Amino acid sequence: MTRTISVVNQKGGVGKTTTAINLSAFLAKLGYKVLLVDIDPQGNASSGFGLRVTDLEESIYDVLVDEPKQLDSIIKKTKISKLHLAPANTNLAGANIELVSMPRREFKLWDNISTISHKYDFVIIDNPPSLGILAINGLVAADEVLIPVQTEYYALEGLSQLLHTIELVRQNLKPELKILGAVMTMYDGRSKLSESVFYELYKYFPNKIFRSIIPRNVRLAEAPSHGKSIYEYDNRSKGAKAYEKLAKEIAEAKRF
Ligand code: ATP
Ligand code: MG
């Protein structure tokens, strides 16, 4: 059965895209069929796999708006054989407004993913840094939510609002939605701050913080500029090891 996991945090720059790209890559390396769906107008998950997003003829925007295209028709292969990508670019910014007046506006992504999810073991959704209609689509389409939390002083700011939004989605739109867990990103073991963020985070997610902690690692930051996941760019780096471990942990996690 397909597991659809949405990578969500309305806070910007916390490692959502880095997590979505590298989790997808390592799940594919483990032998799973994976579809990565980019629903951020920034298109970082798409350019991170080497796509020139400004040149895209069709993207997830064309799937979500009026007279939609089939999701199947916009999906691209990546250099990783079991990993496919549904790309996004700045066109998608318009969808924020266009979706507002459309019927089933919160269900657009789910309706579309449902038509093809049987082809995949995992669908991973990379969300924009907001809790607008796109991210609501990203939550409604998912079975499970993965929350990257940057290990820094302001990390927990906004988490209450995020959890409240997830609860509202659960009550009104998608009762089956579950929180898979939080993953700490950009962890610096030398700093006392990292430890204290862990303890604070634990109050929000008792028993739901992944054992795999993603270190701050320059190779992870470099990889997207080469259009590669860390698995392709530097499989021996600490960042690669951490994301490989996370992928295994998630693959083995009981679904609910
Ligand atoms: P946005 O909210 O804009 O979508 P995001 O949450 O998707 O951002 P990323 O784009 O993944 O965050 O990461 C933000 C920046 O930090 C990027 O430049 C990325 O390369 C870098 N980065 C992410 N994770 C790490 C890490 N573990 N070590 C070093 N740099 C990282
Ligand atoms: Mg991003």
Image (cartoon, helix red, strand yellow):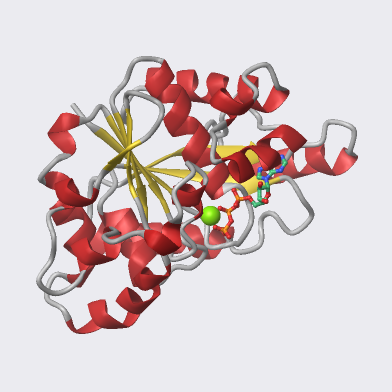
| Residue farthest along the front direction in this orientation | 55
Picture layout, residue 120 above or below residue 222: above
Q: Nearer the viewer, residue 188 or 203?
A: 188
Task: Identify which residue, 7 or 196, lies in the foreground.
Answer: 7
Q: How many marks?
A: 0
Is 152 positioned to the left or the right of 35 in the image? right
Q: Is residue 226 visible?
A: yes
Residue 197 horizontal/vertical position (percent): 75, 44
Q: In terms of depth relative to the viewer, which is nearer, 213 or 87?
A: 87
* Residue 43 position within the rendered picture, expressed as x and y whole percent measured from the top left: 46, 58
Residue at image position (49%, 68%) is 130
Q: Residue at the spot x=13%, y=66% of the render?
A: 68
Compared with 80, 69 (above or below) is: below
Residue 139 is situated, as x and y percent measured from the top left of the image, at 33, 55
Tell me if 1 is positioned left or right of 194 in this view.
left
Lateral position of residue 115 relative to residue 55, left or right: left
Residue at 43% in and 58% down = 53
Quadrant location of the N terminus in the rendered image: top left
Q: Is residue 59 above or below residue 150?
A: below
Q: Quadrant of residue 245?
A: top right
Q: Is residue 173 visible?
A: no
Which quadrant of the figure contains the C terminus?
top left
